[in-house]
Image (cartoon, rainbow, N blue to C red):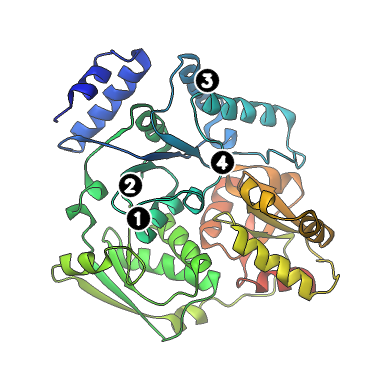
Amino acid sequence: MYLSKYEEAMLHGDYGDTIARAMQVVVKVGDVLKADRLIEIETAHIAGVSYLTIGDPGLEYLEDLAKSSARFHVFTTVNPVGIDVLNDWGIDKEFIDKQWRIINALKSMGASLWLTCTPYEYLRIRPRTYHAWAESNAIAYINAVHDAWTEKLPGPFVVLSALVGRVPRYGLYTLSGRAPTHVVRVKGGQAINNPLIAGLLGRKIAEEVGDGKPYLVAKFGGNAVIKQLLASYATYSPHAFMVIDGVTPNHKEYLAMMDKPEEINLDINDIIKDSGVEKQNFDAIFLGCPHYGIDEVMSVINYVRSKRSKRAKKPVYIATTPFVINSLSQDELNLLENSNIHLVLTTCPVVSPFLKSVGVNTVATESVKQMYYLPKMIGINYISCNGIKCLDLAFDE
């Protein structure tokens, strides 16, 4: 594999032993993948940073890197961790302390601690730029919505890529590796406005296409449903890549690249029929996977205002970011809290014990991604609910 003089210098220790070891791994991975060269990345996004998932070995690994004075070579953001940095939610103190050690290790290496799974909502990402990201929903989003290029990378590998600012050139880092193999047409006419339906569609596409790469022809009623579509698709897809007609930059070029693609026709009405919500017991509503942005949180605030001082009978937990909190007035924050709606920052239920800590065993959620991970990761059951109607369950239950 071809290496530039600068890359050779990193490999041979001219920039320190830690960089050399990181470069050695990146090069070896590139050789295995038959990459022809390394490419420079603009950003990195690290996942797998909750103490719940990486434990003491991961903590020690990151602290060892930080103690070596290693620094990230590119702008690097970090996925949700196992705690809310502003509220302990009853989580064990030892867990909180070790999570903070992970956060501080990443901070000392130069990471921007946004602690969100939606960094794409706060970055200006240009088409056809290279990135090393390790959060599946975010990977699917920047590939589809920005035509920015990243593979579905493991979290530890992204740490090393961020240190050297390079990834091997293979797969989705090449134009030929991004050629769609299937055209998926969604019949039904109307734009998809329901987050649950969008998520179920994403799962269905992943099941139908398998290892293939879909070119999706469908109408969507906004960014919130596209987020749910892609988060769900990425959960069930091995590569988290699709092209969306009329949304993906350069979508016409991708359409022209296809050579005798397989055609798949889906009827959205069939998916709607399969999305029925049974009346079941649940302990709380969970929204915010992927993390809610300001528009989604404002839709909740507007819903609460329409209830005219009614309080939710079941608690509602919404995962979001400090950016959103900082955009809300104190009156808006008080309105949510007084309505039994709680904003949870910098974390996610599948990488945190916070739901168990507040006594939740079953949640109602619109997120098809959560439906996959909740039982597997933390032993919490779920029922599905349809978008804003999730709030109806809490208020009118």
Q: Which numbered mark, 3 or 1, is in the foreground of this view?
A: 1
In space, the residues marked 3 and 1 are separated at their CA atoms by 32 Å
Give the secondary structure at mark 3: helix
Marks 1 and 2: in contact by CB < 8 Å? yes
Q: Amino acid at mark 2?
A: Thr
First-in-chain label (2 vs 1): 1
Which residue has dot 1 on it? 143
Q: Is residue 30 left or right of residue 19?
A: left
* 5 lies above or below 334: above
In the image, 185 versus 20, the foreground residue is: 20
In space, the residues marked 2 and 1 are separated at their CA atoms by 7 Å
| Residue 286 in picture, x, y percent from top left | 66, 59
In space, the residues marked 3 and 4 are separated at their CA atoms by 19 Å
Residue 373 at least partly seen? yes
Which residue has dot 2 on it? 150
Q: Which mark is residue 63?
A: 3
Q: Amino acid at mark 3?
A: Glu
In space, the residues marked 2 and 3 are separated at their CA atoms by 27 Å
In space, the residues marked 2 and 4 are separated at their CA atoms by 20 Å
First-in-chain label (4 vs 1): 4
Q: Which mark is residue 114?
A: 4
In the image, 247 versus 157, the foreground residue is: 247
Q: Amino acid at mark 4?
A: Trp
Q: Which numbered mark, 2 or 3, is in the foreground of this view?
A: 2
